[in-house]
Every structure is written in structure tokens, then in C-alpha cells.
Amino acid sequence: MIAETGLAPIITAAAGLMGAVVLLAVLAGGARLTAITTVATCDDTSQPGQPEPLSAEPCGRRPAVMPIEGLAEPGHGLIAVQAALLMRGVPYSWGGGNANGPSFGIEQGAHIRGFDCSGLAEYAWAKAGARIGGHTSTQWNAGVRVHRSQIRPGDLIFFATNPARPATIHHVGIAVDATRMVHAPSTGSTVRIVTWAGVPYREHEFIGVIRPATIRTAASHTTP
């Protein structure tokens, strides 16, 4: 598990380094990247028993069907999560964010420059060389499904109103470790790290984990 204090090697590693260099930097800092099934002990920004509201995905984005090519190596995932962690504190913007970074969103996000959940995921993985698209439905098909016991930093964690139906996916986070993710929660919040494993409403809506491919072409946000 990457403890809160263990995030520093990821965040301070040069953004332009290749995955192998980033991996060495994290390991040098003592971070342990093996899968962990227990709940992490960290400061969760949400209030106990008070789930963060999760906004539905905005209209105006068109998912694309994409062929899977090469799956991401561990170093690519570390680059992706590092990029997301560097965005902590950026405002949530409904429909905001794309492969280039924060942007103004649509509707209630029209005057807020920031990210929504899928915009943050798109940006993070673009930094790692993957074009996963700007909508959760596209991102769900942007790689291969991996078991939660095999979660690696950077993997995409999805949540759905009905976990039996991928069409109801409404939220995505980027794995920090096996129990925590960095995500853009909802209007009025900012990009942050939260614990999801073992949290009842998260577990109830958990649908799966996707490890992206590193080379692809996909539809992006159609935001300003």
C-alpha cells in the first residue's frame, strides 16, 4: 500500500520520466505496490456515513469503440496516477477536463475550470501515453478487466448504479493502491484521495477495474 507519506516519491518524480524511472523512484521511497485486500488507514476527506454525491455523466460526449493494442506496463500506471495526484485541489467541473488538462465544463460546470471524474482519468492516462476517451462508457472499454486483488496504481476503478449493467456506470477513479483512489467527486468538491474499499456505498456500486492499453485512438470530451 502506498501510505499517505509514501505519495511523495510519486508526486516529486519528474513528470517527463519514463515508467521504469518512476517505478524506481517509488520503490526507492519504500512504497509497496503489491495488492492489498485490507482497508487502508488514511485520512478520508468524506464524512463517515455521509457518501459524496456522484453526478451523472454530462451529455455532449460521444464514446468510441476502440481496439485494444498493448496493455500498460506498471510504469505507465504510475505515471498516470502521478499526473492525477498533481491535480489534487483542482475544482470539480461537470463536463470539464480532457487530455490537455483542466477545462471549463458544461451546464453547471460552464464557469468552472477543472475536471469531472472521466476528464481526470482521460488527462492522467494521456500523460502515460494512452488515449482512453473522455466518457466512462469509452473508458470502461479502454483496456482489459483485472481482478480487484490485482489492482495496480493507475488502474481505473468504476462504479455503477446497477453493477450488473455497465450502461449504468456513473463514476471512475484512478487507483492509488488497492484500497484508495484519486478522483473528482462532484460539484463543489475538488480532486482528492479517498478510501473506496470497504466503504459500504462504494462496495455496493463497485463494478470492476480496467487496466488501459497504452496506444489507442478515442473520442475526447466535447467541452470548451
Image: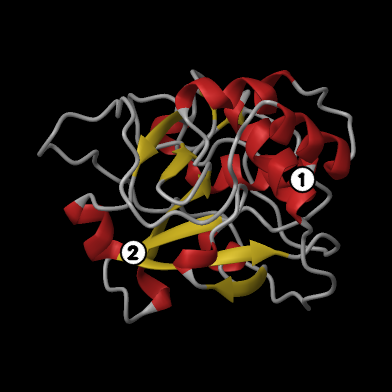
* Horizontal arrangement in the rendering, residue 156 relative to residue 14 (left or right): left
Would you place residue 56 above or below residue 165 in this image? above
Residue displayed at 50% across by 72% down: 147
Would you place residue 41 above or below residue 204 in this image? above
- How many numbered discs? 2
Which label is found at residue 126?
A: 1
Residue sitting farthest toward the left: 49
List x then y, in percent, for residue 216: 83, 64
Q: Is residue 103 visible?
A: yes
Residue displayed at 70% across by 49% down: 77
- SS class, disc 1: helix
Q: Is residue 87 visible?
A: no
Residue behind mark 2: 206
Q: If you read the primary sequence from the N terminus, does the residue marked by circle 2 or circle 1 appear first?
A: 1
List x then y, in percent, for residue 87: 59, 24
Spatial CA span between label 2 and label 1: 24 Å
Residue type for callout 2: Phe
Q: Tell us which disc is closer to us: 2 or 1.
A: 2
Which label is found at residue 49?
A: none
Residue displayed at 51% across by 20% down: 5
List x then y, in percent, for residue 29: 67, 26
Which of 26/128 is in front?
26
Which of 190/155 is in front?
155
In the picture, the quarter occupied by the C terminus is top right
- Do residues under tags 2 and 1 come within 8 Å of each other at their CB atoms? no
List x then y, in percent, for residue 199: 22, 49
Q: Tell me how the rendering is colored.
A: secondary structure
